[in-house]
Amino acid sequence: MNMTIMFTATSMTLSMMISMMIIMLKKKSTTNKQKMSPFECGFNPMSFPRVPFSIHFFIISVLFLIFDIEIIIILPMIITIKSSMLLKWLISSTTVITILLTGLYHEWNNGLLNWTK
């Protein structure tokens, strides 16, 4: 029990000493607001923080994720064509591709892929 308390106290003391050394020895730098702000895609970090994001940015990112997952689904289908029953493989791959193309057609018809209106 005493060894556990002593080990805990030693490790806490050591970590506090290292933290204090880092604080004292860190490089002091003067940076401006632009250098300190994080860079994020889709909005200007120097503008008012409550400005809503562009909905087109999010739609394109969701479409990218959907078609990225499509690649993950279709790639094993191509690899397993030799080891599976051809009719079941054809039906499943056609179904997946039809669902994805139907969704893309629906988004295209509603004008969600247009950047300007």
Image (cartoon, grey):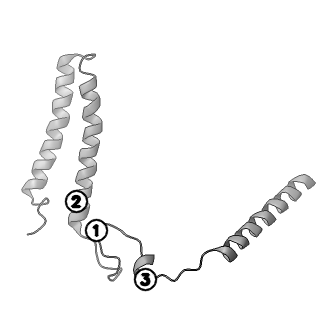
Q: CA distance from mark 1 to mark 2?
A: 11 Å
Badge 3: how crowded within 10 Å, few (<14), some, or many (20+)?
Answer: few
SS of the residue under disc 3: helix
Q: Considering only order in the chain, which callout, 3 or 2, is on the residue closer to the N terminus?
A: 3
Number of numbered discs on residues: 3
Furthest-right residue in view?
Answer: 2
Tell me the amino acid under the disc marked 2.
Answer: Ile
Q: Position of residue 55 (x, y in %)?
A: 22, 67
Q: CA distance from mark 2 to mark 3?
A: 30 Å
Q: Position of residue 88 (x, y in %)?
A: 21, 21
| Tag nearer the camera, 1 or 2 | 1
Tell me the amino acid under the disc marked 1.
Answer: Gly
Please give the name of the residue rendered at 77% of the width and 69% of the height, measured from the top-left corner: 17
Badge number at residue 42: 1
Badge number at residue 73: none
Task: Please name whichever residue, 21 or 114, is drawn nearer the observer in this view of the structure.
Answer: 21
Badge 2: how crowded within 10 Å, few (<14), some, or many (20+)?
Answer: some
Q: Is residue 111 left or right of residue 1?
A: left
SS of the residue under disc 2: helix
Q: Is residue 67 left or right of residue 7?
A: left
Q: Considering only order in the chain, which callout, 2 or 1, is on the residue closer to the N terminus?
A: 1
Q: Quick check: can you spot residue 67?
A: yes
Q: CA distance from mark 1 to mark 3?
A: 19 Å
Q: Is residue 108 left or right of residue 5?
A: left
Badge number at residue 33: 3
Question: Which residue is the site of mark 2?
Answer: 59
Please give the name of the residue rendered at 25% of the width and 47% of the height, measured from the top-left corner: 66
Q: Quick check: can you spot residue 1?
A: no
Task: Please name whichever residue, 24 or 62, is drawn nearer the observer in this view of the structure.
Answer: 24
